[in-house]
Structure formats: C-alpha cells, structure tokens
Amino acid sequence: MKEARDQWATRGIALLRCGGVFAAVRVPGDIVRAAAGTDDPERIGAYLKEALQGGPVFVDTSSQRYYVLVPASTSRLPQWDGHTVPDTECLGSGSFLGVPRPQRNEPEQSRSYWCVPMDGPGALCSPAAVSQLVAYGRYRRAAGERVAAEADEGDRE
C-alpha cells in the first residue's frame, strides 16, 4: 500500500492489481451517458451514485471509459466470464488498473477522477446493478439511434 500512496502522491494515479480485493468492470462512456440521459459530469455522477447504490466509480476522461469497482469474484461470474454483458470487460486476476487518488473527485482535477467516490475499502458495487445499468444504457442508446435514423429519413423525404 505504501507504493500506491507514493504513486498517488507523485503521479495522482496508482497502478493496482485487480482480483485480490476488487475487480473493475469497464463500461464505455456512451452507455453510461445514455443511461444517465445527460453529458453533464455532475449529473452522471449523481445518477451512478443512485443506480449503483453508492458503489465506487471512476472515469478516464481521455478514453471516455468508466470503471466500476466490484467484488473480485465478479470476473468469475458467467455474465463476465463468458462476456455476455455486451460492450463491457471485467478486469480480474492478472489485470492492473490505474486508479486515481481517492481524493480526486472533480472533473477539472485530472484525466481520471472519481465520479462516485469510495466510501471505504470494502464498499463495492453490486454486479447485478452494474449489469442492469449496462442493459439500460444499451437500450437507451439504441432507442436514441433509432430516433435519429427516423429523423434522418424524414429529412430526406
């Protein structure tokens, strides 16, 4: 843990091994934004806090990916072991993750920040809630694409 604290102090991000205490589900930003119904970072954070019952989530603003921290056993669940939660990846044993300093929770502070800060080391998200969030986001994204396609067809007529 000393090494992580040193990395947070010098770089703002620590490289942590997944699979011991936690795993992380990587979710594309477009799915999260569609589920939240907004592009506003504060509103997205509030939505995620409610939808994931306060479980920790951070975002890499460069890649536009959200990382939802879940119990380490999540990577062995059929929905992620078999990749049946589309568009996501569960980072478990053997994976390393660049995790922002726990106090970094403002979008302007850096490339990576906590949109839902950790309450404590054992406070993690429910895998079922993450799966529901992804399903809802995919549904809303598809509905938005369908509406946009219909509008394009109407413009051509």
Image (cartoon, rainbow, N blue to C red):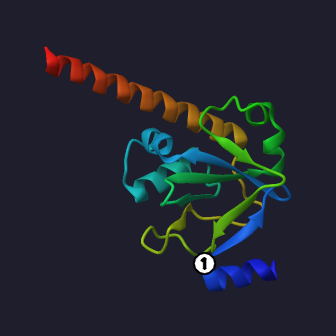
Q: Quadrant of residue 2?
A: bottom right
> Which three-letter amino acid code belongs to the residue tagged 1?
Gly
The residue at 13%/14% (across/down) is 157
Q: Is residue 121 in view?
A: no
Q: Position of residue 146 (x, y in %)?
A: 35, 22
Q: Quadrant of residue 22?
A: bottom right
Q: Position of residue 95 (x, y in %)?
A: 77, 55
Q: Nearer the viewer, residue 88 or 124?
A: 88
Q: Nearer the viewer, residue 37 or 61?
A: 61
The residue at 43%/39% (across/down) is 34
The residue at 47%/75% (across/down) is 109
Q: Quadrant of residue 82?
A: top right
Q: Position of residue 132 (x, y in %)?
A: 61, 34
Q: Which residue is identified by label 1? A: 12
- Vertical relation: 124 (above or below) 107: above
Q: Position of residue 49 (x, y in %)?
A: 55, 53
The residue at 65%/54% (across/down) is 55
Tell me if 128 is positioned left or right of 66 in this view.
Answer: right
* Number of marks: 1
Q: Is residue 90 in view?
A: yes
Quadrant containing the N terminus in the rendered view: bottom right
Tell me if 157 is positioned left or right of 81 in this view.
Answer: left
SS at circle 1? loop
- Vertical relation: 94 (above or below) 110: above
Within-10-Å neighbours for mark 1: few <14, some 14–19, many 20+: many
